[in-house]
Amino acid sequence: MSDPKAASALRAAQMYYLQDMTMDAIAGELATSRSSVSRLLSHARETGLVEIQIHPPQGPELRLEEAIRGRYGIAAHIVPTSQNMSDVERFERVAMSAARLLPLFFDSNMTLGIAWGSTLDAISRHLPKKETHNSTVVQLNGAGNTFTTGVDYASEILHRFGQAFGAGIQQFPVPAFFDDPATKEAMWRERSTRRVLDLQARADVILFGLGSPFAEVPSRVYIGGYLDRSDYRSLREEKAVGDIATVFYRQDGSWRDIDLNKRATGPGFPVLARASRRICVVSGLQKLPSLRGAIATRLITDLVLDEHLAEQLIAG
């Protein structure tokens, strides 16, 4: 191991986790301070030298996870939260937990599809390091609108995922929504576009949040200049409750006949369903209608959510 810091972190981690030495004892052996040992242990966790798994006994979270699996056939990962926690705090807690879970599902020789947005942005900031080989992270939907190309925003998220996993990244430099469905159809026939679409269709894992007009933490598609008044009116009339990668759906999971989807650049749900693992990350009670609709699409295989949202999901 050529990196001196990594070597020291590994040595400290072995002493702490395998030999049950205290931080004070490790500091004495390494001739350093206790605070330095603490930083080395944090570095070992953040870079993947140490992976911590929690196997809880039967408790509220586990009962909720079993209830969700039994009712919906979905593997739930419930994040404990307190009653007095704000939605912003819940959002950050859930994003951090999703970031720490992702390395369990994504590895070498795999393709990860990600849908940009507030949730993925937050997750990308908490990703631990896990070196993989021959892996790719692909953008699932365009991010441009009449105000911005969206390239900087989406590429920053992709870059963080690529750095965390040592993966190649593939951007999708098209608008989030075309003005004319015919333009989209023509663009989708281009070989350069088809290459990205084919990569999306071969994704092993997809990771997405749920866009929602109800959330306290605003979904970027609703606040970033992507929709105009006629779009909002159309979505209300068609009873859309949320979106996955800018593809809108109703409470019953239907989506094909929603007019705006003809211009959306996100993959149709049958394409997303090809991925063997489809991880949805969601928090906040305001997203309950969006979550119910997303479950009805039958896309979700894994669900990372806060405890209170899980309780309401099962209660309804």
Image (spheres, rainbow, N blue to C red):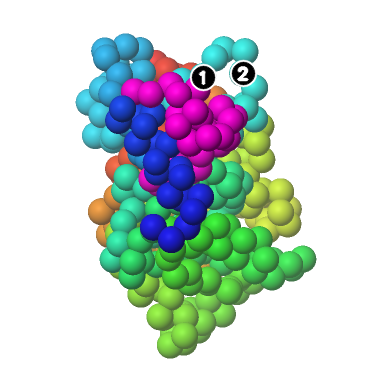
Q: Which mark is residue 165?
A: none
Residue 92, x across and y down, in percent: 58, 34
Which range is magenta?
A: 20-49
Could you tell me which secondary element the residue under label 1 belongs to?
loop
- Relative depth, front residue between 123 and 68: 123
Asked if disc 2 and disc 1 are in contact, CB closer than 8 Å, the reply is yes
Q: Is residue 301 left or right of residue 156?
A: left
Q: Amino acid at mark 2?
A: Met
Residue 229, x across and y down, in percent: 73, 53
Give the residue drawn at x 64%, y 22%.
86
Give the residue drawn at x 69%, y 70%.
149
- Relative depth, front residue between 181 and 151: 151
- In the image as oriented, which residue stretches furthest toward the right? 147
Which quadrant holds the N terminus?
Answer: bottom left
Which quadrant would residue 307 be assigned to in this image? top left
Residue 16, x across and y down, in percent: 39, 29
**Quick check: 51 above or below 83?**
below
Please name the predominant secondary structure of the magenta segment in the image.
helix
**Quick check: 133 above or below 30?**
below
Could you tell me which secondary element the residue under label 2 belongs to?
loop
Which quadrant would residue 142 be assigned to in this image? bottom right
Q: Amino acid at mark 1?
A: Thr
Residue 211, x across and y down, in percent: 55, 45
Residue that badge 2 annotates: 85
- Relative depth, front residue between 173 and 14: 14
Q: Which mark is residue 81?
A: 1
In space, the residues marked 2 and 1 are separated at their CA atoms by 7 Å
